[in-house]
Image: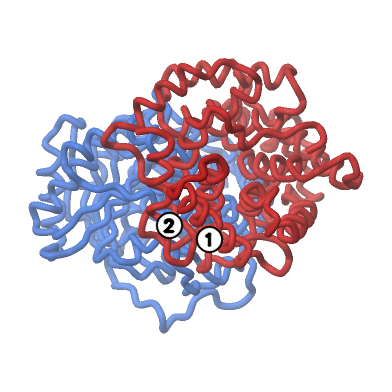
Amino acid sequence: MMTEEITTQIESTQNPDGGWGSRPDLPSTTEATALAVLALDPLAGQDPSTASGEVRGAADSGVRWLIARQKQDGGWPVSDEVPEPGWMTGLALLALKGRASGVEAVSKGSRWLLREESRGPSWRVRIVQRLLPQERRTLTARELDPDLSGWPWVSGSFHWIEPTAYALLALKSVRDAGSPGRMQERIRKGEGMILHGSCTQGGWNHGAPEVLGKELWPYPDTTAWALMALQDLGRREETIRGIAALERMLEENRSMLSLSLSVLSLQLYDLDVSQLRAELAVRVGEEDFPDETRVRAFVSLALAESVRPFQVTRNG
Amino acid sequence: MVDRRRFLKASAGLALTAAHLPGCRGEHQGPRWDPEAFAKRPTSPVAVLPASSYQAPLSETIRRGLGLFGLDLRGRRVVLKPNLVEFDPRGVVNTHPLLVGAAVEAFRELGAQRVTVAEGPGHRRDTEYLLEASGLREVLADTGASYVDLNIDAARGVATRSRFTSLGRLYLPETVLAADLLVSMPKLKTHHWAAVTLSMKNLFGIMPGTVYGWPKNPLHWAGIDNSIVEINATLQVPRFNIVDGIVGMEGDGPIQGEPKASGIVVMGPDAVAVDATCARLMSILPERIGYLREADAFLGNAGEDRIELVGEPLEAYRQDYQVVEHLAGVKEAAPFSDS
């Protein structure tokens, strides 16, 4: 199965309302729709054939679905059934950036991301924790540092790696030399959260490198997202150790999600991903190819060699 | 033995822990549930069944256990919800896949129309990896049971039926809401915040990650004990519970504790009674566990005198499960011995 075939598969599972569900036949969600639009986008722009026109049409419907679902405050909900805006906002921005019809939505969405803060321990807990002897503290210095501020999955809760990576990639992709200092500052705080949140052995898990003094281990997918979010910082200790950890984890974890996100992240560090891509190409032909829209979209993007959908530069 | 000083120190630790999680002590003044909306039975049956290893005839054990409760499963759509929160090759984090497979067979043999395995892992989004690494994928292939990732299932907002949190509504997965019977299949484990994680806490895993995240942090902010009670009070699907206590986990659960061979499967329709019995099997006092104390008032029966043991006697299988230091106050060993 080639990229075009996966793309056709994604296109064929579009819901009548123009969006995509997490799996075929499920109601549309912002996450699945944003990733489907991203996956369809490369083909839509490259091939003027009829098929490409259909793909372009499907992507455009997805874009319209996204724009119509944006909340008044600029954020995006999980779905029509779950209207509260939250972590999917970063993904919606990534899908809409660069599209003429999405300029206003991207601008509003960026402002929403700038306002969105994670919720850490209260000042009272911070004081109590700092007064306790080290061995009795149940929160780490990282968790107590108000200057390390990523993005939560759900407004009003703590920050985690994946939603922080989405928000950083979205903000970095729309910033330019004239972006306000507030945006640069928010990006810096988000980067700080990721940089200080890596596991002892390198790489990142969901966002808790240790609990009650015990180390937890990294995951390939969250490590890949963290690396993508930090790509413009260049090679530094955290990213070098993250890359090494990702390569180690891939020795045991060859899931489609791990392989595809590894391709998408490692190529941003100019590393050779041809073997990973070749394995993906073989695996997508297998019978148990996942029906999850998100995984299909990442595989499609990873197989499209000329595409770097999550690439950002110092200036956007 | 836990002396008064150690107990007070542990209690202070518990209070400090609770302070990290706003809402632990309840965000609402006044009644938190409507007595007219909940009717519990005066007593609840619980079965403790021996199962020496995962190689034992587990399907037979589960069939025998189900037979003790007279469930009519003919034509029912059954959803089995194991604990698959994380994978660690060195540990015993999850409900053993062989027990899940045995349950699939047992429910089918008793006439269930469809048996689905469903879970929304709490930490990881890589379902393919978790299924493969945990061994559940192989069991699913062998039994032909389908698997639903509840984290990405369609979610429906349901108004909470109690007021233990300020969430107001819970988003629940359609796969669970459409079931004729939801079977919570937790591992017998201690938990470094909630003291134990059993049938009731296992339902955190039905909450869709797309709505609540990975981990399901808003439920932590709402107070773990409060969220456990709220989910269990709000979910109106008929329920049953099968706890994997063949090898449990003690210490720093739910992820980093140590294996503890206990050789039991605990079953019953009342999650409160099943969890209270499991706590006693671990030499942990149910009345010191916040969510069991609350749930005992309106959802089920935690009191020993209101639980009918229909399987083996509890004493034969009681063990001393270790807990993390700040939870020492939940242990059974006479906390007031010097008073």
Q: Which residue is mark 2?
A: A14
Q: Which residue is mark 1?
A: A61
User: What amino acid type is highlighted by mark number 2?
Assistant: Gln
Badges 2 and 1: C-beta atoms under 8 Å apart?
yes
Question: What is the drawing colour of chain B?
Answer: blue
Q: Is residue B70 visible to the viewer in this orientation of the structure?
A: no
Instruction: Please tell me which residue lies in front, A303 or B285.
Output: A303
On the image, the x and y values in percent for residue A49 come to: 47, 45
Classify residue A176 as left or right of residue B206.
right
Let me know if marks 2 and 1 both belong to one chain. yes
Name of the residue lying farthest toward the front? A49
Snapshot quadrant of residue B318: top left
Furthest residue to the bottom?
B36
| Residue drawn at point x = 38 percent, y = 49 percent | B149
Image-based side of B118 in relation to A178, left or right: left
Question: For chain A, what colour was chosen?
Answer: red
> Which numbered disc covers residue B231?
none
Label whose residue precedes the other's in the sequence (2 or 1): 2
Question: Vertically, is B133 above or below A14?
Answer: above
> Does A65 sit above or below residue B86?
below
Query: Element under label 1?
Result: helix
User: Residue A254 at x, y = what percent?
Assistant: 41, 25
Who is closer to the viewer here, A84 or A7?
A7
Give the percent coordinates (x, y) of residue A144.
77, 39
Residue B118 position, x and y percent, is 33, 50
Q: Judge by depth and name the residue closer to the eye, B49 or B281.
A: B49
Q: Residues within 10 Å of mark 1 (few under 14, many from 20)?
A: many
Q: Chain of mark 1?
A: A
Q: Nearer the viewer, mark 2 or mark 1?
A: 1
Q: Residue at x 16, y 41 (%)?
A: B143
